[in-house]
Image: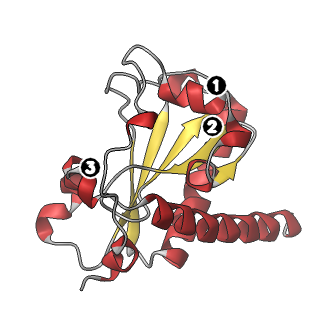
């Protein structure tokens, strides 16, 4: 069994229609309006300008970094938002390597799907044992799989807690070295 599948033992076996919103609404803004109510998987890290969430996919550790204000492109970032994003991408990549055991991470930003135009950046673990068709842009095949094989809510929450702990330790180390 590939190493990345160790966290994929629990799968969603039903369609969670409670999370579906009308296409014209911004999903990220809806979630950002209720941060305290979000499950662990949707608030792995909460910063001044960004939050980290585990994406809906068949790949354990597929994360998204989501702006806490409604913007749609990187050019709209303030200097402080851009700085926090840079640090968060680096620390989240380290946390994924620590928790998931990935070889490296892929970073992507599109925001083209209706309801998801809000600026969010994908951080995708690139596992050592990926088939060659999952390398590079092929990794998006994990998003195309049916919901029945997505990483379960329980597994995403468990990973979220592990990742949050590592991110907290990295933040503490960074603060103590200043």
Q: Which mark is residue 90?
A: none
Question: Can residue 83 be seen?
Answer: no
Query: If the image is split into quadrants, where does the N terminus sit?
Result: bottom left
Say what secondary structure mark 3 lies in.
helix
Q: Are marks 1 and 3 in contact (CB under 8 Å)?
A: no
Q: Position of residue 147 (x, y in %)?
A: 27, 50
Q: Which residue is mark 3?
A: 143
* Colour scheme employed for the rendering of this structure: secondary structure
Say what secondary structure mark 2 lies in.
helix
Query: If the image is split into quadrants, where does the C terminus sit?
Result: bottom right
What residue is shown at x 60% (from left), y 67% (from top)? Answer: 163
Q: Which residue is mark 1?
A: 69
Relative to residue 49, is residue 110 drawn left or right? Answer: left
Q: Which residue is mark 2?
A: 82
Which tag, 3 or 2, sits closer to the chain's start?
A: 2
Total numbered circles: 3
- Pick the front one: 102 or 33: 33
Which tag, 1 or 2, sits closer to the chain's start?
A: 1
What residue is shown at x 71% (from left), y 68% (from top)? Answer: 170
What residue is shown at x 20% (from left), y 47% (from top)? Answer: 144
Q: Are marks 1 and 2 in contact (CB under 8 Å)?
A: no
Say what secondary structure mark 1 lies in.
loop
Q: Are marks 3 and 2 in contact (CB under 8 Å)?
A: no
- Pick the front one: 60 or 40: 40
State which mark lies toward you, 1 or 2.
Answer: 1
Which tag, 1 or 3, sits closer to the chain's start?
A: 1
């Amino acid at each position: 069994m590939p190493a990345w599948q160790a966290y994929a033992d629990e799968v969603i076996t039903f369609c969670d229609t409670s999370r579906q919103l009308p296409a014209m609404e911004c999903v990220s803004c809806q979630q950002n309006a209720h941060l305290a109510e979000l499950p662990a998987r949707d608030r792995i890290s909460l910063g001044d300008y960004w939050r980290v969430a585990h994406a809906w996919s068949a790949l354990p550790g597929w994360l998204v970094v989501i702006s806490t204000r409604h913007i749609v492109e990187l050019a709209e970032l303030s200097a402080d938002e851009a700085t926090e994003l840079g640090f968060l991408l680096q620390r989240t990549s380290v946390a994924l390597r620590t928790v998931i055991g990935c070889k490296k991470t892929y970073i992507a930003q599109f925001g083209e799907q209706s309801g998801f135009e809000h600026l969010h950046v994908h951080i995708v673990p690139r596992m050592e044992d990926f088939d060659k068709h999952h390398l590079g842009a092929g990794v998006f095949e994990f998003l195309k799989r049916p919901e029945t094989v997505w990483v379960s809510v329980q597994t995403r929450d468990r990973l979220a807690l592990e990742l949050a702990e590592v991110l907290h330790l990295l933040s503490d180390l960074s603060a103590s070295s200043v």
